[in-house]
Amino acid sequence: MLALRRREFHQFQGGGRDFLYLVPSAAVFELDQPGRAVLDLLSTDAPSEDTVVDRLSDRFPAPVVREAITELLNARAIGYEHLQDAPGPKQLPMMPFPLNTIVLNVTNQCNLACTYCYEYGEDKIVDTEHGQQSKFMSETTAREAVDLLLKESGRVAHMTFFGGETLLNFPVLKATIAYARGRAAEVGKTIDFSLTTNATLLRPDIIEFLAENEIGVTISMDGPQELQDKFRVFHNGSGSYDVVAPKIKELLRRHRTRPIGARVTLTSETIDVQRIYRHLTEEFGFWEVGFAPVTTSPQQQYAIGDSGFDRMLGQFRELGREFLEHAVENKHHGFSNVKDTLEEIHKGVSKAYPCGAGLGLLGVSTDGDVAVCHRFAGSDTHKLGTVKTGIDRAVQAEFLEQHHIADKTDCHTCWARPLCAGGCYHEAHVRYGTTRRPNLHYCEWIRGWTDTCLQIYGELAVRNPEFIARFDRDETRAEAVL
Amino acid sequence: MKRTRASGALLVAAALLGANLLAQTRPASEGRLTGGNGTLYIGGYPNLVWIIDEATEKVVGTIHTKGGIPRRLNLTRDRKLFYIIDATQEVVEVVDIASRATLDTFKLTEGNKRVRINSIEPDPTNRYAILLTRTAVKMTDRVDIGPSTLLQYDLKDHKIMRTIDWPDGQERDQANLMFSPDGRLLYFLGNEVLIFETETFKQVDKWDLSNIEEGLGQVSVSFGGFGGLDTVYDEPGFLTTTLTIEDPVQHRRMVGVAHIDLNKKDLDFYTLGPAGGVNIVLAPDHKHAYGLESAVGRYEFWTIDLDQRKITSRAEFAGRPRMALKASSNGKVLYIYQAGHTIDLYDAATYKYLRTIELDGDVTTGFFVVPRQASATK
Amino acid sequence: MTHLKPINRKAHRVADLAASGFNRTPAADGKDVVALQQLPGPPHFPLGCSLAFSPGWEADSTGGTAGLCQPVERDIFDCHLGCFWPAHVPDQLNHSPNWTGSCATAQKDWRKLDLVFPG
Amino acid sequence: MIARGRLLAVVFSIAVPTLIVAQAPPPAPAQRPASPPSMAVSDEGIPVTDPVVVRACGSCHTRDDKQRMTRISDRRATPENWELTIRRMMSLNNVQLTPDVARAVIKSLSDTHGLAPEEARGIQFEAERRLIDFAFEADKDTNTLCSRCHSIGRVLSERRTKDEWTRLLAMHRYYYPGIDGASGGFRRGGPPPTAAAAGRGRAGGDQSGRGAEDAQPMDKARDVLSRSFPLMSAEWTAWSAAMRTPRLAGRWAIAGYQIGRGPLYGQLTIADRAGVVDGFTTESKFTYSRTGETVSHKSRAVVYTGFQWRGRSADTPDDQGTWREVEFIERNGQQITGRWFTGAYDETGIDITLRRVANDPVVSGTDVSALKTAASNQRVRIYGANFPATVQAAEIDFGQGVKVSRVVSASPDTLTVDVDVAANARLGPRDLAFGGSSIATPVVVYSKIDAIKVVPVAGMARLGGIQFPNRPEQFEARGVSYGADGKPGTPDDLDLGPLTARWSLEEYAATFRDDDIQFVGELAQSGLFTPNVEGPNPKRSGNRNNIGDVWVVATYNATAADGSVKPLKGRAHLLVTVPLYMEWGSREVGR
C-alpha cells in the first residue's frame, strides 16, 4: 500500500480549536478531531491508508477516516511518499510591472541627529554630508517623478514623501501635490499622498494643508520623554520630546481626514512596548502605532541582541492579546503590526519577495535617481534608472531575478516563508553586506511573531469571524478603486 | 404678478365661460360607460384648477388661483379645501372648493430672502400647517442656500410658530407627513415611521417598518405616488399603499399591498409578484388594483384581484411615455393623465380606449378623483 | 470539505479547486469568466446631450428617441416650470417668465413659442 | 430656413435698450436692500487692476487692500465662460453695460483671469463647438452630475478656489430650485442609505473615520472639482508672466478639411487691426481641391489670453459674422490650429491649420490622401506657398517605395505630379518633404480597399425649419485598409480618406414598431442629412414629433484586383432629435 507522509504545514491552536497553516499555499484550515488524529499518526512514521484506518478504528468509523485522508491529500497537507510534489516553478512577475507607490526623498538633510539613524550613522549607504548629492529635491525633479508615476501606474497611484526630515522641503512638497493632482485628473487617474516626519517642523499652516488635502501622516517617535530623548536628539544633543509633543497633539486634534500613525524604533535600551503604546495612544491619541527593531550592524551598542528579541517578542505577544480582546468586541486597537499581519494571513499571501521594493514601490533620491526603495535612494549599486529617463526594465528584471525566494535556499525549509520571504533587503545589506541574503539573525523572532499572529487569527475565526470578513470588504473596496 | 387678477365676483362668470369648452361632448347616451358620479379636479396653466363632473366629463367650473401657476394641489382630508403651492414654490393659497373662492394666501419670501415651500401639511382643524422649506438669500455678490427646515406656521396670524428639529438630527430634503385624525400626533412616514406629539413636537414613539417580520427581509413602504399621498379612499388614520420587500434568502424584490393602521401601529400585507416598473393604484372598492407598466416602447395595463391576490389580466396597449394612472370612482374606467392637456379614458375591463377629455390649458399639477358620496356626507 | 473547514481566502480557493476535481486550469482568479460576458457599455450620447432620464431631452436612457415625450410639446410645461431642462427650455423662474404667455396648450399653439437668447 | 441673421437681430434688440453710458457708476439699484458685507477674498485671489472692470463690476464686487475683488479674483475661465457670467449679470442681476464695455470686460478678464495654454488645449473642443464623445474620466459621478444639463467642457473651462466652487453650486441652487431633486440630482432625496450609518458616520466612531460614502452628490463633486481644478497652477503662473500680444501679422498657408467637401488649401494674410487691443483682420482665399471651387474670406478677430484667437467673418462691412473662428495659437507663433464654423447649431465646420510663410517654400498638403501600391502615374496635386518655378521630380520625397515620375506643372502654390508606387512599397502613412519644408502623413500607401466606414459614427440632427432653426448633419464615407496584417480592428489599420459612395437610410429598430424612417428627413447623395420640420406631426401616431434614430448606410463598389466588383458597406447611427429652445452660443467674444 502507498505510504502517507506529512507535507509542509504549521499546526497551531486558537480559541480552543486546531488549525493548519499550509506551506507554501498559505491556506488556513480548521482541523476537526479525525483530521487531527490522522496528522498526529503521521507525525512519526509513514503508514499506509489502511493502517491509519484500523489504528483509528476505535475512535472514528472507517469512512470518516478515509474521507479525512482524502481531504488532507487534496489540500496537500499530506502526500504519498513516492509522489514528492515538485517545488513550485520560479515565476517572475510579468513585466513591465505597474508602479503602485513612489517614495520621494524630498531632502536628505535632517534637523535631528538620532543616534541610531541608518542614513547618518556608520551604517549609512550614501555619504550625504560630503557627497555630491544635492541637499534638496528641486520642483522639476519632483514633477518628473510625478510624471513617471502616472506613466507607469494603474488607475490608482500613491506618492509618499520621505527624507531626511520631509518638512524641511515643504514648499516643493506642496507644489508637487498640486501638480500631481492636476496631472492625475488630466489622465483620469486617482492619486493619494502620505508623508513621514519627525514632527519638529509642524506649523499650523502645514497642519491645515495636510488636513485640507487629506495627506496620510506617519510620525517617527519612540514614546514617553525619557525613551524619546535617549536617541531622538537635536544636533546639540538636547531631547526633541518637548518640541514635538505639543505639535503632534495639535496635528491629531486638527487633522481628521486620514488616520495618523506613529512609528516607533525599538533599541536595546528602550524595549517597553506596553508603556510606549499606552503613552502614544492615550496621551497623544494616535490612531495606530507600529513598532520596528532598529536596523543596525551587530556591533552598535543600541543593537538588540538575542535576549533583547526574546523580551520584545514577549511584550509583542502581550499587546497582541490586548488587540485580540478589542477585536473580539469589534473595538478599535492601534497595534498595527498585528493588523497588517492578520490581513496578509487572511488573504493567504504567499510572497516571492519580502516587500514591494523594486517591484510596485520605488524610491527617488534628491537628484532624481530611481532606486529599489527610499533606503537605497542615491546609492549607485541599487539604481534602477532616473525619473527623467524612466525605469531601466532590464536592471529591474535582473534585480527581481536574483532576489526571488526560490534562490534563498536557507528559507526553503522554513514554514514562515510565505509571509517573510527573507525579510528587508536593507537590513540584510547592513548586516551581511548584500541584499540577496535572508536575515538569518531574526528568523526565530519572525517565526515566533508569525505563530502568535496565527493564533490570534484562529481565535478571531472562532470568537468573531465578522472582524476577519472586514478585510474582504476593504479588499473589494480597494479593488474597486484599482 | 403676470396679469391683473379678476376680483372674486367675476369668478362665477369665468366659470360659466369655462362650461362651453371644446370637450368632446356626446349626448349622454345610457349605453356609454362612465367613470361614476364623482368629481375630478386638476390644475393647469395659466392659473386655474378645473372641476370636471365625472358623469358628463364636462368642466363644470374653474377655480382661478391668485398665487400664479398652480404646481402642487393638497386636498384636505375632509375634501373641502385645496392648499395650492404655486410654480415658484413661494406662494401658498387656500381655496374653498364648494364656493371656488380663495380663502387665504401667504408667503414667507421677503426682500432678497426667498423661502421656498416644498410641501405643506395642514392639521385637520386647519389651525396651523407644517411647511417643509429652504431659504435662498441673494446677497450683493453671492447667494446663500439655507438648510431644509420644518416650520410650524400659524394659518390665522400668518406667523411662524416654531422650527421643528429633524428626527435624529438628520436633515431631509423631502418629508412625507400625516396628522392623526384628532390632530394630536404627527407621523413622519418612511421605513421608520416616527411619531411626534403636536404640542412641543417631541418624538414620542417610533415604529420600524423595515423589518416587521422575521424572515421577511428589508421592507420599504412607498408613501405618496404622483401628486402626493392618495388618501382619498382611506378612512382617517388608515393608509393603503404599496410596499416592496427584499427577502433575505433569495434576495428577490417583491411588490405587495399594505393596509396600515397608524393608531395601533399594525400593518397587514400580502405580496403580489416581482417588483418592477409597475405603478399600482387602488380601486375605490379596495378589492381591485390597477397597474400601469411603462418601458421604452412597451406599455401595459394590469388588473389585480386583491382578494385572490393575483393578477387577473395584463395586456399591452398603445401608450406613450410620461403617463400616470388613476382609477375612476366606480372603478370601471381608467384615467391616463399627466404631460399635456388631455385625460384619456380606457375601459378598465377590456383596456379599450374610450375617449379623451381635452382641456384648454396644459396640466401642471396632480389629479384628484373624489367619489360623490364621500364628499356629500361631510 | 467537512474535516478541513477553509478559514482564509486562499483556503477557500484551495477548497474550490479540490471540489472541482482539480480539472479546471487555474483561471486567473475568475478573470476569464468576466471577460466572456461582454458587459454592454453605456449607450453613446452626442456631447451636449443631458443624461437625466425620466425621460432625457435629446435621447432617452437607451440612447434612442422612443422614450422621449410624444410629442415634446406635450410636456413643455414640466420642463418650463419645474426647470427640468434649464439649459434647453427657457425657465419660468428666471429667464423668461412669460415665454408661454400666448401658448396655453403647447401642442396646439407651439408656433407662438420663441427662441430665447439668455442675457 | 431661418437665416442666421435673424438671430442676431434679436440680439441687438436686447442689447440696444441698455445703452447707458457706463462711465457714470450705475445708480445703486433701489430695490437692493442692505445686506451683510460680502465676505473677503481667499488669500490666493488674483488682483483686478483694469479700471474698466473695476468700474463695471465694483458696485457689488468689493475690493480689498490688495486690489482683489470678491468672487472675480477667485476664478479663472475661458472667454466664453466669462461671457456667460457677464450676460447673466446683465439679465438676472440687472447690471447695465453697453456692448462695448461688456466686450472690454470679457477681454480684460480673459487676459488676467484666463486659462494657460496647457490647461486650455485639452478642452478646445468646447469653444470650437465640436460634437464629440468626451467624458471627464477622473470622476464618473461628477461627469454624470454636471453633464445632466450642460456639456462637461464648460466645467473643465473653470479654475476656482474651493470656496468659489461652493458658491458656484449655491448659484445653481438659487436660480434652479428643482436642481436638488429629480431634475438635477444635486442632493439625495431621503436620508442617507441607512439612518444608522449616517448617525454612525456623523459621530465619526466608525473604523474608517470618514463617513464620505454617504456625502451628497453635490459635495462629492465640489471636492473633486476643487482638487482637480484649483485656482492657482504652475502653468498659469508661468503663462501669465510670459503672456503678450502675439506678433501674427504676415502671410500664412492654409490647410483645412471640411467633412463632405474634402481638403482645402490657400493663403491668408493677417494684419493688425487699428484701435482694437490684440485685434487682427484677415483676408484669405482658399480652394476646395476636390471641386476647384475658390472661396475668398475676410474676418475680424481678437486674441484673448495671448493664444486664444476668436474671429468672425466680415466679408462685407456690415456682415453679421455668419462664420466664427476659434483657433489656438502655438507658443512659437509659427502654427495656428482650430475650427471655422457656421450654422444655427455651429454644425458646419472646417478644421483649419495655418502655417507661417516667410520666403522659402512651405508644403500644406495634397489633394489625394491614399496611394495604391503597384500603380504608376497616380496624379497628385501638392499645395503650399513659395514653390519655385522649376522643380525636379527628385526634390519631392514621399519616402521609400514611392517615386515621383513626372512633374506635370508647377506654380507658386500648386505642384501637379505623377507618382509611381512600387509593388513592395511598405504600407502605411508617409510624410511629404519638399524644398526644406515637410508635412506629416498627408498620404497613406495601401494595397487594397478592404472596407469603408462612415463618419461621424454617431451623428445628431435636430428638427427645425418652422419656428426654430434645424441642425443638418453631414456624413462622409472613408476607405479603410486592414494594413499589413490584413486583420480588421488592429493598430496597423489605415484610413484611406474620403470616397464617393451611395447613401441610404435604414430603420434602427429600437422598438418593434419603429417607423422613424418615414418621418425623420432626407439623406442626399452628398451625404448631407436634412431633418424634417419640428412640431407635433398629426400624420404620426400620438401626434409625435418627427424624431427618431436611424442607420446611415454608405455603399461603395470596390473593384478588386481581378476586376470583379465587390460592394462594400459601412454605417453610422444618426439621432434625429428635438430642437433647443435656448441659444447659449457666444455672441460677444471676438467682436
Image (cartoon, rainbow, N blue to C red):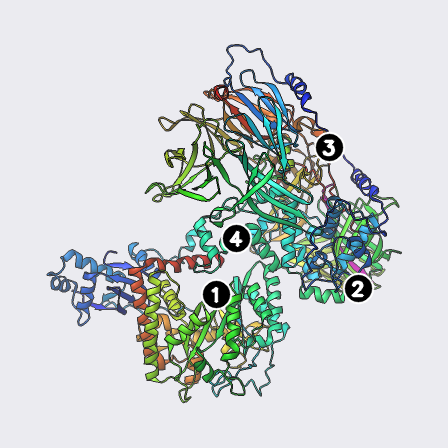
How much space separates mark 4 and mark 2, taking CA atoms?
Answer: 44 Å
For the residues labelled 1 and 2, say whether their Cβ atoms are less than 8 Å apart: no
Q: Looking at the image, tell me whether mark 4 or mark 3 is earlier in sequence order.
A: 4
Tags 1 and 3 both on a single chain: no
* Front residue (pair B42, A295): B42
Question: Disc 4 vs disc 3: which is toward the camera?
Answer: 4
- Vertical comparison of B25 with A166: above or below: above
Instruction: Give the magenta-colored segment's residue range.
Output: D344-357
How much space separates mark 4 and mark 3, taking CA atoms?
Answer: 44 Å
Badge 1 marks a residue whose secondary structure is loop
Tags 4 and 2 both on a single chain: yes
Report the residue marked by disc 3. Answer: D467
The amino acid beneath tag 3 is Gln
How much space separates mark 1 and mark 3, taking CA atoms?
Answer: 61 Å
Badge 2 marks a residue whose secondary structure is loop
Quarter holding residue A444: bottom left
Tags 2 and 3 both on a single chain: yes
The amino acid beneath tag 2 is Arg
Tags 1 and 2 both on a single chain: no
Q: Is residue D486 visible?
A: no
Report the residue marked by disc 1. Answer: A259
In magenta segment, residue D347: yes
| Chain to which mark 1 belongs | A
Badge 3 marks a residue whose secondary structure is loop
Q: Looking at the image, tell me whether mark 2 or mark 3 is earlier in sequence order.
A: 2
The amino acid beneath tag 1 is Pro
| Chain to which mark 3 belongs | D
